[in-house]
Image: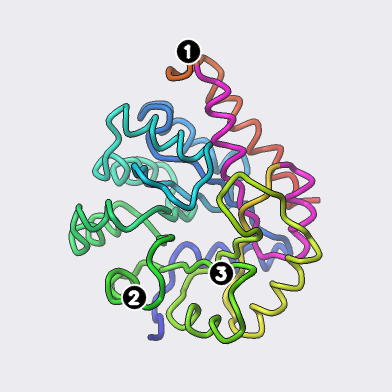
Amino acid sequence: MSVNFETRIDAKFRSLKEQKRAGFVAFITAGDPDLETSIKILKGLPDAGADIIELGMPFSDPMADGPAIQAASVRALANGQTMIKTLAMVADFRMLDNTTPIVLMGYYNPIYIYGVERFLTDAKKAGVDGLIIVDLPPEEESELCLPAINAGINFIYLTAPTTTDQRLPVVLKNASGFVYYVSITGITGTGKASVGDVEKSLARIRRHTDLPIAVGFGISTPDDVGDLAGHADAVVVGSALVKQVEAGLNNGSNAGPNVVKDVLSLVSQLAGGVKK
């Protein structure tokens, strides 16, 4: 299925190519640790250096995520985060910023419960540019991938070190926006990406697609970001930012006075890695 529309994601990667640098992608969980604090962090991400934002949709059983992002989902859900509130966050963000791409990342269950058609309508209206749904393989593309493309929203597929050359064409057939390369086997926030292995894998993926490739998982420091920025089109950091949120909590649950500032400061440090 060909994609005959352009999103903010396409425009951003075109701009990054003109700047001759990789992009920095920041992940946060919507509603973590609470809605008000999460909105403040979201709105501050572009000025802190985020080129693209991944906004996690909280889910009670985030099977691909490590302890940090699992805990973030628990906090958000405990404080009443819903899909309606997550989409409202995007709409609120769009009142101030109409250029920074936002990708919703998560699991199919909350979308299924919300209703696919309703979700895509509301997501497009709010200003969502792309979706990463980790538990929907290409074999289930009729569930959400194809409807999302028809709605003008990029559907971004994950590839991994274990994705074979035979499997890649299946995964990439209807991918759009960019390809998300999971640099380690396992869950988020565990292990560390090997630059040499990533370089070889990206070269292999590029033989199958012209889409930009973002690398995530196992990346937590400015040096990590800088090491991969020379090979990937974008570098994603999630668990380190979520851990910074957790570090700024009072009594393990309430946002402390410096949590927003400290998270955005870390984003600035990490984003510096793509500009070396």
- Give the mark nearest the N terminus, 1 or 3: 3
Q: Secondary structure at mark 3?
A: strand
Q: Position of residue 80 (x, y in %)?
A: 27, 30
Task: Tell me the crowding category of disc 1: few under 14, some 14 to 19, or many 20 or more residues within 10 angstroms, Cα based.
Answer: few
Q: Position of residue 44 (x, y in %)?
A: 52, 35
First in sequence: mark 2 or mark 3? 2
Q: Are marks 1 and 3 in contact (CB under 8 Å)?
A: no
Tag 3 residue: 159
Label disc, if present, on residue 268 of the rendered structure: none
Q: Which mark is residue 251?
A: 1
Q: Identity of the amino acid at label 3?
A: Thr
The image quarter in which residue 262 lies: top right
Please tell me whether mark 2 sits on a helix, a strand or a loop: loop
Give the total number of marks visible in the rendering.
Answer: 3
Q: How dense is the environment of label 3, judged by Cα within 10 Å: few (below 14), some, or many (20 and up)?
A: many
In magenta stretch: residue 223: yes
Asked if the stretch drawn in magenta spans residue 151, the answer is no
Magenta segment boundaries in residue numbering: 221-249
Q: Between residues 260 and 189, which one lies in front from this camera angle?
A: 189
The three-letter code of the residue at mark 2 reads Glu
Structural distance between the alpha carbons of marks 2 and 1: 43 Å
Q: What kind of element bears circle 1?
A: loop
Query: Where 189 falls versus 172 (above or below)?
Result: above
Where is residue 12 drawn, in percent x and y?
55, 62
Marker disc for residue 141: 2
| Among numbered discs 2 and 1, the one appearing first in the sequence | 2
